[in-house]
Image (spheres, rainbow, N blue to C red):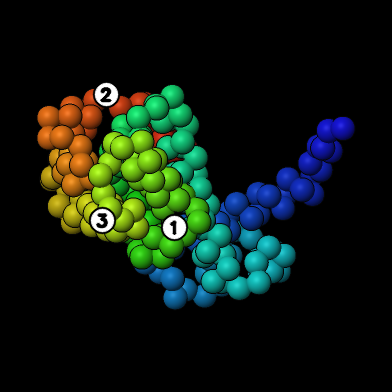
């Protein structure tokens, strides 16, 4: 038995919800989280009544906007690293792709940066995947860290600070900076220096597949 095809009403509701989420992502990226619901509905070009058909509050919409951004980014990383078997390479590739996101997808980058520490405890997007990759590295003996949560804290804090640095220093080479930090993290986690350098300089998957242009 197959699921019924979405009706015209279903499609219209999905478009309205997506428009509200995109508007909220733009406001978060701009640091305008104190805005009124009316401003959000006007930016999304939907009626006030339509807002309450989907969300009970502005905070709920903002949570959905962040979760949407995180999930789309996380799914893209999974797709781009699915053929890799070495946890160290998966971690490095994901970190390097995320570092490059800050210049190539500035709006999403600012959503991530402006939500800050809440990302570290989120069940969506990057955080659970970083934990997974670190734990896999420890389990297979690739990483020699004693405490996976502390290793995660180092990686998450570094990723957020790198993003902020790349926004405040637009002339800095984002690829070089990201690859160097990736190498430093791998060495911190127990990968030998020469190997850490090689892993952090390997060719990357197609960056244009990282995220759709809808969240630029």
Residue placed at 38% from the left, 56% from the top?
112
Which residue has dot 2 on it? 203
**Left or right, 145 with reference to 1:** left
Q: Secondary structure at mark 1?
A: helix
Of the numbered discs in the image, which one, if any, rests on residue 154?
Answer: 3
What residue is rendered at 40% in x and 50% in y?
131
Kindly report which numbered mark, 1 or 2, lies closer to the viewer in this rendering: 2
State how far apart marks 1 and 2 are (Cα). Answer: 32 Å
- Residue located beneath label 1 in the image: 26
Q: Identify the residue at the far right of this view.
A: 1
How crowded pointer 1 is (Cα within 10 Å; few <14, some 14-19, many 20+) is rated as many
x then y, percent, for residue 156? 31, 55
| Mark 3: secondary structure | helix
SS of the residue under disc 2: loop
Q: Nearer the viewer, mark 3 or mark 1?
A: 3
The picture quadrant where one finds residue 171 is top left
Decide: few, some or many residues near mark 3? Use Cα within 10 Å; few <14, some 14-19, many ≥20. Answer: few
Q: Position of residue 43 (x, y in %)?
A: 53, 61
Looking at the image, tell me whether mark 3 or mark 1 is earlier in sequence order: 1
Residue displayed at 43% across by 62% down? 121
């Amino acid at each position: 038995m197959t699921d019924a095809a979405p009706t015209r009403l279903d499609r219209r509701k999905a478009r309205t919800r997506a428009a509200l989420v995109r508007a909220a992502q733009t406001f978060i990226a701009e640091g305008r989280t104190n805005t009124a619901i009316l401003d959000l509905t006007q930016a999304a070009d939907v009626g006030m009544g339509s807002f309450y058909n989907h969300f009970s509050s502005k905070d709920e919409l903002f949570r959905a906007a962040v979760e949407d951004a995180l999930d789309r980014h996380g799914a893209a990383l999974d797709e781009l690293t699915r053929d890799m078997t070495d946890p160290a390479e998966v971690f490095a590739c994901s970190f390097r792709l995320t570092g490059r996101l800050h210049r190539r997808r500035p709006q999403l980058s600012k959503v991530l940066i402006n939500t800050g520490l809440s990302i570290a405890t989120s069940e969506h997007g990057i955080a659970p995947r970083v934990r997974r990759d670190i734990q896999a590295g420890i389990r297979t003996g690739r990483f020699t860290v004693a405490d996976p949560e502390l290793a995660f804290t180092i990686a998450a804090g570094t990723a957020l600070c790198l993003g902020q640095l790349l926004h405040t220093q637009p002339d800095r080479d984002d690829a070089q900076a990201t690859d160097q930090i990736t190498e430093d993290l791998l060495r911190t986690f127990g990968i030998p220096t020469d190997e850490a350098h090689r892993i952090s300089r390997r060719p990357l998957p197609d960056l244009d597949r990282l995220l759709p242009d809808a969240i630029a």
